[in-house]
Image (cartoon, rainbow, N blue to C red):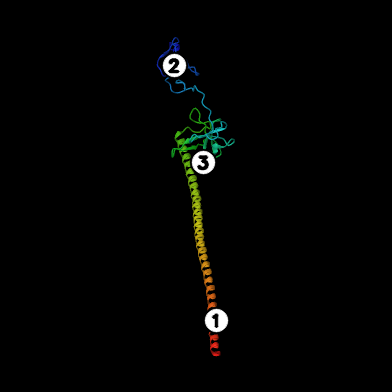
């Protein structure tokens, strides 16, 4: 009896063939039109098949749709290095080193410059790290390599690997911070030396300006002194000449008196 009816997943009413307003989706599931109109998602309520063709992804920068990579850390979509290289630029700017190639669904590690076999989340800080495991999981929870199925040992090995990765990351971060410290200290020293040089040049410029002004005043005073010295010399000559004339006049008077 159940084979004669289809039961609607989101509306518990039988779909009889004589009822109207029945919609069959692409995935061959049938629903009442009044019920499916209440479903806000574009996927099928039964199998979640998307009824709409998803929009093709494009590079966030140049909007190309070829050779795309998506950052698994923040979701940034960029083109590969054989296009404009916006994906690798994003890694250089943010240090998000894991990127998923949309065509092959493989993850690339920019730091190691190769594909990643598997990513796990670190229990220490929650960061994504690479798990370089040679065991491929099988149906019996053990890989084809024939390793032991002891999960306690595997968990211990995993924790030790994660701890080693975290320690390596911390050492790398410490060395990077140290190099950044040296770099910025050199910038500060260079800026301090440049500032001192500019201050010294400004002081020398002010001193030269004051010296030039004082020299100009001194030259003006020397010219005025020379002018006054010339006037004094001319006055002295005039006084001597008047004295000579006075003496000559007195001698002439004396001679006139003697002759009379």
Distance of label 2 from label 1 (alpha carbons): 143 Å
| Quarter of the figure with the C terminus | bottom right
Q: Which mark is residue 245?
A: 1
Q: Which mark is residue 93?
A: 3
Q: Are marks 2 and 1 in contact (CB under 8 Å)?
A: no
Q: Secondary structure at mark 2?
A: helix
Q: Nearer the viewer, residue 63 or 223?
A: 223
Marks 2 and 1, the one that precedes in the sequence = 2
Q: Which mark is residue 254?
A: none
Identify the residue under disc 2: 33
In the rendered view, tell whether residue 56 sits above or below residue 241: above
- Where's residue 24, x and y in %? 48, 16
Side of 243 relative to 11 (left or right) = right
Q: Are marks 3 and 1 in contact (CB under 8 Å)?
A: no
Q: Residue at x 50, y 46 (%)?
A: 176
Marks 2 and 3, the one that precedes in the sequence = 2
Q: Residue at x 51, y 41 (%)?
A: 93
In the rendered view, tell whether residue 255 sits above or below residue 11: below
Marks 3 and 1, the one that precedes in the sequence = 3
């Amino acid at each position: 009896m159940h084979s004669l009816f289809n039961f609607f997943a989101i509306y518990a009413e039988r779909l009889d063939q004589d009822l109207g307003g029945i919609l069959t989706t692409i995935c061959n599931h049938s629903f009442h039109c009044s019920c499916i109109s209440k479903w806000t998602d574009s996927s099928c309520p039964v199998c979640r098949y998307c009824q709409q063709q998803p929009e093709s992804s494009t590079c966030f920068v140049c909007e190309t749709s070829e050779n795309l990579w998506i950052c698994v850390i923040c979701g940034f979509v960029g083109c590969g290095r054989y296009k404009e290289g916006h994906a690798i630029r994003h890694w250089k700017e943010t240090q998000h080193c894991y990127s998923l190639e949309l065509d092959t669904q493989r993850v690339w590690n920019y730091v190691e410059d190769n594909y990643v076999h598997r990513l796990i989340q670190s229990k220490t800080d929650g960061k994504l790290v690479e798990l370089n495991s040679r065991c491929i999981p099988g149906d019996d929870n053990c890989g084809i390599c024939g390793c032991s199925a002891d999960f306690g040992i595997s968990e211990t090995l995993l924790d030790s690997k994660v701890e080693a990765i975290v320690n390596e990351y911390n050492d790398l971060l410490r060395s990077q911070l140290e190099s950044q410290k040296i770099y910025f200290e050199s910038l500060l020293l260079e800026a301090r030396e440049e500032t001192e040089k500019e201050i010294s040049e400004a002081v020398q410029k002010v001193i030269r300006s004051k010296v030039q002004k004082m020299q100009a005043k001194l030259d003006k005073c020397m010219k005025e002194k020379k002018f006054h010295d010339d006037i004094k010399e001319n006055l002295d000559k005039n006084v001597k000449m008047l004295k000579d004339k006075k003496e000559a006049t007195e001698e002439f008077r004396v001679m006139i008196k003697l002759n009379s």
